[in-house]
Image (cartoon, rainbow, N blue to C red):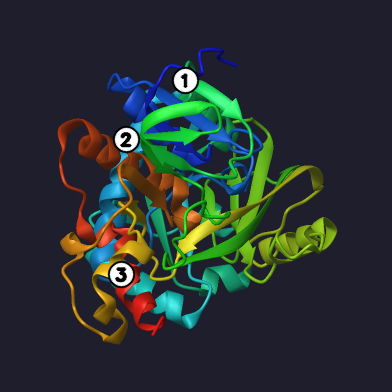
């Protein structure tokens, strides 16, 4: 652990999941002095439990599709070029798991420029009748990364601190976080307590569970169906995972039933193909953070109290240009990626870098302030 805590950092990042680690990487590569903080460890939460698939999002036309298409291409290039030792490139088979998903998939197949084909006979022989009958798309190019391996590699050489941040203090133009002082603050805290009074930010916590196991069944590609099934960078080990429990909360005080979670994952996996001679090696669990409108978040944070004091009629529906809101000084949030954290992280972190280094404005569609007007109306 570094000892020069009194020297000011250019950026302090709170949260060492994939968003925090990617942000630290790009900012440090650009010459900024960066401190990274987490209350447990690097990739210790939802990011460490992620399948970390570099997969396109199957969706119809719209803002999210455009963002995800660009982010997917950037992520494939980023991981395979910079971290090949933690990246496994494999074809990707996405199978619809519902009629609604099937409709989106068929639309996507007609519209996408990504190379894809029909399932070949060898792969089809591994699938269950249900999986064969459902709509599917077989991409030539997909990837999975070692979640914890790549997060640790991203922050190699960067000052890292483990402690629980309980308060933030802004004084004399600087942010004080514990004993650390920095000019700019980046909150990459996922669905955990927000540290600032920003209740308007529309986030939902999604509990994830992944198991690593050995099986005598050969998995020739990455499969997404009811759950995700994939070979890994650790030869012979297969990962099975899903964001499958939207009701469990680690803040409830009730323990998570790991054994039942395993049973659910294996039962769903059996609907895709038969896994023989399974030996479960390790469980990974954690809370992921998705936005209420499914778009990721990157941008400044509104000081709700100060803004409502200046524009009290926002509570009654008055439209105020977001540029007139009062924002916390030198704070940026990166959040809300849901199950696509490893796809979106390089995309978001590069735009954070461009904003801080080159003063290139962040697309307002990503701004966390988009949730503020509706929340403000409920305060009347």
The residue at which mark 1 appears reads as 158
Q: Mark 3 vs mark 1: which is more N-terminal?
A: 1
Packing grade of label 2 (10 A; few <14, some 14-19, many >=20) is: few
Residue drawn at x 49%, y 27% is 180
Residue drawn at x 33%, y 70% is 372
Q: Mark 2 vs mark 1: which is more N-terminal?
A: 1
Position of residue 188 relative to residue 235, above or below, is: below
The residue at which mark 2 appears reads as 173
Packing grade of label 1 (10 A; few <14, some 14-19, many >=20) is: some
Real-space Cα separation, disc 2 to disc 1, in angstroms: 24 Å
Where residue 114 appears, x then y in whole percent? 28, 52
Real-space Cα separation, disc 3 to disc 2, in angstroms: 22 Å
Packing grade of label 3 (10 A; few <14, some 14-19, many >=20) is: few
Q: Which mark is residue 96?
A: none
Label 3 SS? helix
Q: In the rendered view, does 128 fall on the left or right side of 121?
A: right
Where residue 258 appears, x then y in whole percent? 80, 56
Q: Nearer the viewer, mark 2 or mark 1?
A: 2
Label 2 SS? loop
The residue at which mark 3 appears reads as 309
Q: Mark 3 vs mark 2: which is more N-terminal?
A: 2
Where residue 34 appears, x then y in whole percent? 41, 25
**Residue 324 in view of the camera:** yes
Residue drawn at x 50%, y 56% is 339
Label 1 SS? loop
Figure quadrant of residue 185: top left
Figure quadrant of residue 74: top left
Contact between marks 3 and 1 (CB within 8 A): the answer is: no
Q: Nearer the viewer, mark 3 or mark 1?
A: 3
**Residue 215 in view of the camera:** no
């Amino acid at each position: 652990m570094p000892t020069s805590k009194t020297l000011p950092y250019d950026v302090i990042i709170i949260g060492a999941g994939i968003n925090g680690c990617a942000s630290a990487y790009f900012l440090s590569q650009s010459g900024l002095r960066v401190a990274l903080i987490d209350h447990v460890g690097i990739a210790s939460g939802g990011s460490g439990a992620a399948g970390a698939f570099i997969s396109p999002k199957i969706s119809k036309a719209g803002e999210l599709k455009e963002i995800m298409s660009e982010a997917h291409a950037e992520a494939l290039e980023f991981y395979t070029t910079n971290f090949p030792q933690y990246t496994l490139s494999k074809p990707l088979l996405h199978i619809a798991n519902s009629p609604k998903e099937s409709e989106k998939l068929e639309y996507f197949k007609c519209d996408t420029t990504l190379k894809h084909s029909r399932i070949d006979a060898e792969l089809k022989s591994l699938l269950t009748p249900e999986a064969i009958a459902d709509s599917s798309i077989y991409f030539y190019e997909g990837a999975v990364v070692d979640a914890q391996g790549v997060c640790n590699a991203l922050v190699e050489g960067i000052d890292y601190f483990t402690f629980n941040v309980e308060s933030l203090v802004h004084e004399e133009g600087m942010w004080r976080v514990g004993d650390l002082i920095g000019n700019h603050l980046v909150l990459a805290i996922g669905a955990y307590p927000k540290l600032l009074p920003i209740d308007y930010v529309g986030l939902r916590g999604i509990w994830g569970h992944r198991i690593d196991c050995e099986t005598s069944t050969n998995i020739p590609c990455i499969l997404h169906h009811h759950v995700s099934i994939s070979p890994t960078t650790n030869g012979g080990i297969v990962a099975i995972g899903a964001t499958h429990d939207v009701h469990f909360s680690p803040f409830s005080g009730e323990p998570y039933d790991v054994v039942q979670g395993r049973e659910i994952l294996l039962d769903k996996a059996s609907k895709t193909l038969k896994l023989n001679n399974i030996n479960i090696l390790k469980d990974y669990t954690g809370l992921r953070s998705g936005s209420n409108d499914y778009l990721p978040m990157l941008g400044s944070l509104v000081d709700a109290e100060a803004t409502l004091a200046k524009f009290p009629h926002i509570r009654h529906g008055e439209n105020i240009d977001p540029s007139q809101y009062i924002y916390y000084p030198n704070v940026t949030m990166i959040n809300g990626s849901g199950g696509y954290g490893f796809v979106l992280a390089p995309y978001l972190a590069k735009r954070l870098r461009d904003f801080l280094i080159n003063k290139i404005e962040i697309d307002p569609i990503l701004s966390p302030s988009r949730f503020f007007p509706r929340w403000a109306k409920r305060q009347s």
